[in-house]
Image (cartoon, rainbow, N blue to C red):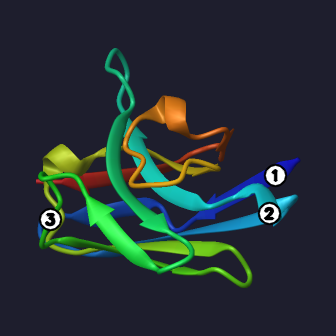
């Protein structure tokens, strides 16, 4: 019912910047929060940043605070993740997520819809 399309991943050097985009379509009236997660092989999916669409307020994992900024357009249900001061440890497959949870959702289980992922690689 909800489709998510991600873009913006790529290869960047240590200290560089990237901006990820996620466009939601379909039954977006069921989407109250959107966010970004990342996952590397052999590890669990990790929360990065989320946004409450009603207020536009973002919230972040401690590991990215001060470096990443999430923003969104709740009309078109497009969410962005501006990533600055990237580090090699930020290298991961980044997933956009959308859900109907009321609050600051930080668990993958709180999101019902997922994008296909976009690869971010930060070289040292």
For residue 8, above or below residue 45: below
Residue at the extreme front? 102
Please tell me the numbered disc located at residue 28: 2
Q: Position of residue 49 (x, y in %)?
A: 35, 58
Q: Which of 105 and 4 is in front in this view?
A: 105
Q: Do the residues bearing badges 1 and 3 touch, measured as CB atoms within 8 Å?
A: no
**Looking at the image, residue 4 lies above or below residue 69:** above
Residue shown at 30% from the left, 64% from the top: 59
Q: How crowded is mark 2: few (under 14 residues within 10 Å), some or many (20 or more)?
A: some
Pointer 1 with pointer 2, Cβ within 8 A: yes
Q: What element carries label 2?
A: helix
On screen, residue 49 versus residue 22, left or right, reads: left
Residue 12 sits above or below residue 122 on the image: below
Q: How far across and down, in percent of the image, does residue 83 sit?
A: 29, 71
Drawn side of residue 7 relative to residue 120, left or right = right
Residue at the (37%, 43%) spot, across then down: 106
Q: Which of marks 1 and 3 is nearer the N terminus?
A: 1
Q: Residue 81 carries which label?
A: none
Front residue (pair 28, 92): 28
Query: In the image, what residue occupies the spot 56% across and 72% down?
Result: 53
Quarter-of-image position of residue 67: bottom left
Quadrant in the picture for residue 13: bottom left
Please give the residue where the numbered disc 1 appears in the rendered image.
2
The earlier-in-sequence mark between 1 and 2 is: 1
Q: Residues within 10 Å of mark 1 (few under 14, many from 20)?
A: some
Q: Is residue 26 left or right of residue 119?
A: right
How far separated are the C-alphas under marks 2 and 3? Answer: 28 Å
User: Pointers 2 and 3 in contact (CB under 8 A)?
Assistant: no
Where does label 3 land, which residue? 65
Task: Name the residue located 48 percent from the left edge and 67 percent from the top edge.
Answer: 52
């Amino acid at each position: 019912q909800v489709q998510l399309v991600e873009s913006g991943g790529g290869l960047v050097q240590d200290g560089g910047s990237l901006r990820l985009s996620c466009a939601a379509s379909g039954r977006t009236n069921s989407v109250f929060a959107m966010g970004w997660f990342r996952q590397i092989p052999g590890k669990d999916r990790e929360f990065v940043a989320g946004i409450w669409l009603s207020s536009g307020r973002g919230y972040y994992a401690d590991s990215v605070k001060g470096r990443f900024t999430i923003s969104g357009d709740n009309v078109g249900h497009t969410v962005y993740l501006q990533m600055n001061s990237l580090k090699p440890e930020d290298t991961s497959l980044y997933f956009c997520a959308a859900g109907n949870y009321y609050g600051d959702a930080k668990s993958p289980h709180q999101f019902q819809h997922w994008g296909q992922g976009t690869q971010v690689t930060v070289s040292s």
